[in-house]
Image: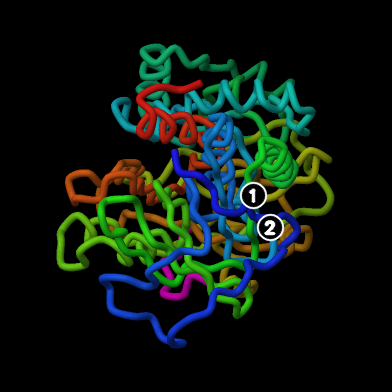
Amino acid sequence: MFKTVARLQLHNNTRFTRLALRSGLIPSKRYFSDVPEFTVDHLVIGGGVVGLAVAERLSRHSGSSTIVVEKNSRIGEETSSRNSEVIHAGLYYPEDSLKTSLCIRGKNMLYDFCNKHAVPHSQIGKWVVAKNEEQTDYLLRLEEKAKRLNIPAEFISLKERERLEPAVRAKEALVSPTTGIVDSHALMERLEYIITENGADVACMTSVEGIVKAEGGQGYMVKVNTDGDVSFILAKTVINCAGLWADRIAGMVMDQNSQSWKDLKIHYVKGHYYGYRGLPKVSRLIYPCPERNLAGLGTHLTLDLAGKMKFGPDVKYIKDPSDYHIEEGERLDDFLNAIREYLPEVRQEGLYADYTGIRPKLQAPGDPFRDFVIREEIDNNLPGFVNCVGIESPGLTASLAIGEMVERILYGKSL
């Protein structure tokens, strides 16, 4: 393990100490500085829920040091806090995919974590609804798949549907009783608390400006900028959990002419969410059948922990990963038509634009399914550099399992 030169007191955005630089420019890609200001065993880039889950896991290792760097002023300001906050059951994705295995494992870990640490959540359940024969066939296949994966799922009769959710219209409905909702902000705050209690640090307002392999194979020299103050960190391992920016972080150290890096290109997908006031009311999550190639899970109905209904997200590929602009008028008709497929009594005047989120998709428009990429880049001669790229839904559900997987990649086992 590296010996930490100085423990970083970075909680609550304390700055890195400024390192005297020979110039204000980044030197050649062979080196940044001969002497780092800090050394650390685990440098996690990205303070969203996945980065925090990874750091929480790695910070358990006694005698090691862990730092999370986050470019925003607070943790979890991007994809992690702009989503449906759903704990997914693991029904939708290919059975041999990381999205499925990590979702199932992560769901169980997340419920255990929330119960242990008093993170607000509710195992509220979900209906996946079909509107025609083709979609009913899809639900039948989904039920068979759930049986193979040991995920609870069963059809519910029309009589029972009318009793439980009289406002919902569907030809058939498949019940997913282990689906739930979680307060993602409270979850991330608890992870951050545990990280710092374990002696690790979280540095907000700290962006990564460059990464090179350290001479002698002693890890990676990482240039960071904390609100104008530049420092260099020598990291034994680097874990890239940068979400919307993960391909750019990877490109700082990977060969940008290689197919390995080109395959990590992130496509930005904006989704709008609409809130709702008034009747009708429902008491569980309602999902239509998902879109072709799993580009999205449809404009679904979710509830927050206060019982407030919201609808979304839609799918819109965009160029700017910072474009959270709400296109209220343009999207409203599309939303209303999609919602009325399963909730016909919803009123247009009750809908209001609430927020948007942006997902980091590896899947380009019209492309087939793409899985999470979670790997140590040994094949690219980058031992100790772990990419976590394309972590969109079900990333929140899978986050703790991703942390466990990264730990196993680096240590060969988990504590």
- Circle 1 is placed at which residue position? 201
Residue at 28% x, 73% y is 29
Few, some or many residues within 10 Å of mark 1 (<14, 14–19, 20+): many
Badge 1 element: strand
Which residue appears at 54% of the width and 30% of the height? 61
Q: Residue 271: tell me if it is visible.
A: yes
Magenta stretch: residue 19 in it?
Answer: no
Which residue: 25% across, 61% down?
254
Q: Earlier in the sequence, mark 1 or mark 2?
A: 2
Q: Nearest the camera: 352 or 1?
A: 1
In the rendered structure, find residue 10 and report the number of the disc placed on it. Answer: 2
User: Which amino acid type is shown beneath numbered disc 2?
Assistant: Leu
Extent of the magenta region = 315-322
> In the image, what residue occupies the spot 61% across and 38% down?
86
Q: Is residue 256 above or below residue 86?
A: below
For residue 317: magenta? Answer: yes
* Residue 315 image offset from top left, x and y in percent: 46, 59
Assign the magenta stretch its main secondary structure: loop
Q: Is residue 189 above or below residue 75?
A: above
Of residue 352 and residue 3, the one placed in the foreground of this image is 3
Count of all numbered marks drawn on residues in the image? 2
Residue 15 picture quarter? bottom right
Left/right placement of residue 114 relative to residue 106 reads right
* Camera-nearest residue between 129 and 253: 253
> Which percent across, then down, holds residue 218?
32, 50
What's the amino acid at mark 1? Asp
